[in-house]
Image (spheres, grey):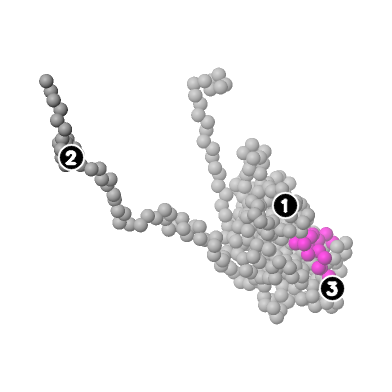
Amino acid sequence: MLTLKPLPANTKPSFLNSLTPFRPKTQTLTKPFKPHSNLAIQSVLQWNRKPELAGQTPRVVVITSGKGGVGKTTTTANVGLSLARLGFSVVSIDADVGLRNLDLLLGLENRVNYTLVEVMNGDCRLDQALVRDKRWSNFELLCISKPRSKLPLGFGGKALVWLVESLKSRQEGCPDFILIDCPAGIDAGFITAITSANEAVLVTTPDITSLRDADRVVGLLECDGIRDIKMIVNRVRTDMIKGEDMMSVLDVQEMLGLALLGVIPEDTEVIRSTNRGYPLVLNKPPTLAGLAFEQAAWRLVEQDSMKAVMVEEEPKKRGFFSFFGV
């Protein structure tokens, strides 16, 4: 018969002595952990610096298209204010005679008292005709004429050449950028606007009529000696491009053969900002179109361009039942 004897209080069973306590293994890192590489950090910080101004000042840029209603005035207002926000002095000229709208988009329609025609006639000084923006003091607006008025017979491209020379020698200092909002068409107003420019930004939309007029304007700009021509493709809709109902940006670039300055997506906020006289780049939170205008202004400062690429979608996998239409 088996009998159980209790163990003394100070003794442990033999099988417990053979067990060793569990100690988790710890590993020390000899090098600090780096979640991002240096290239990634540099790419993030690139947009936090101020762009470096390329070329000689003032840089006279004409914004044109040939066809009306593609967004020249909207581009002039948003790119001009983006340049001012980057710290550059900008003078924007509305060269559309009798049909000016740039002052409406900037919310300065009630502050335009004198125009360039009155400066040429000796009725006022140039500094009186320049309207300083109330939000950014380094942005100024100058209108050529008042609404529903005609230019005198002697007014032409030489007047804008005189204006550029006067802005160079003014006491406040030479502006960094002179943006000229060109009127639609290729008549006398177009010739007047491009006379004093040494750069051009061509605004177009991805449709046949706009591209045909833009190609004609490119030829006229090159005949006038303007070789630095970049384009902005406006009102781009990716859903229509995927459905093959609209030409892609790559197709537009291949047809015109120009460097791409920016791509502006279709945005309903454009109409709201136009009616309020408040440009897109000042909206908080920013819109997609406003960010695209700011990036285009950045590239304009450094005389840079972007590249359009074609993204091919992966073909759908076809299974056994795809033969039956499933």
* 103 inside magenta stretch: yes
**Residue closest to the eye, 35 or 177:** 35
The quarter of the rendered structure image containing the C terminus is top right
Residue 64 got which mark?
A: none
For disc 1, the marked residue is 270
- Distance between the alpha carbons at the discs numbered 2 and 3: 113 Å
- Furthest residue to the left? 1
Q: Earlier in the sequence, mark 2 or mark 3?
A: 2
- Answer yes or no: is residue 307 visible: yes
Q: Residues within 10 Å of mark 3 (few under 14, many from 20)?
A: some
Relative to 319, say whether 168 is above or below: below
Magenta stretch, main secondary structure, is loop
Rendering coords of residue 58 (x, y %): 65, 71
Mark 1 or mark 2: whose residue is earlier in sequence: 2
The kind of residue tagged 1 is Val
Q: Out of 167 and 80, give the one closest to the viewer.
A: 80
Task: Name the residue nearer the viewer: 169 or 14.
Answer: 14
Q: Residue furthest bottom?
A: 171
Q: Residues within 10 Å of mark 2 (few under 14, many from 20)?
A: few
- Most extreme residue toward the top is 324
Q: Pointer 3: what residue?
A: 118
Q: Residue at coordinates 73% horizontally, 76% vertically from top-left?
A: 166
Q: Is residue 115 left or right of residue 22?
A: right
Please, what secondary structure does the residue beneath circle 1 have? helix
Residue 285 vertical placement versus 247 (above, below): below
What segment carries the magenta color?
98-113
Residue 178 in view (yes/no): no
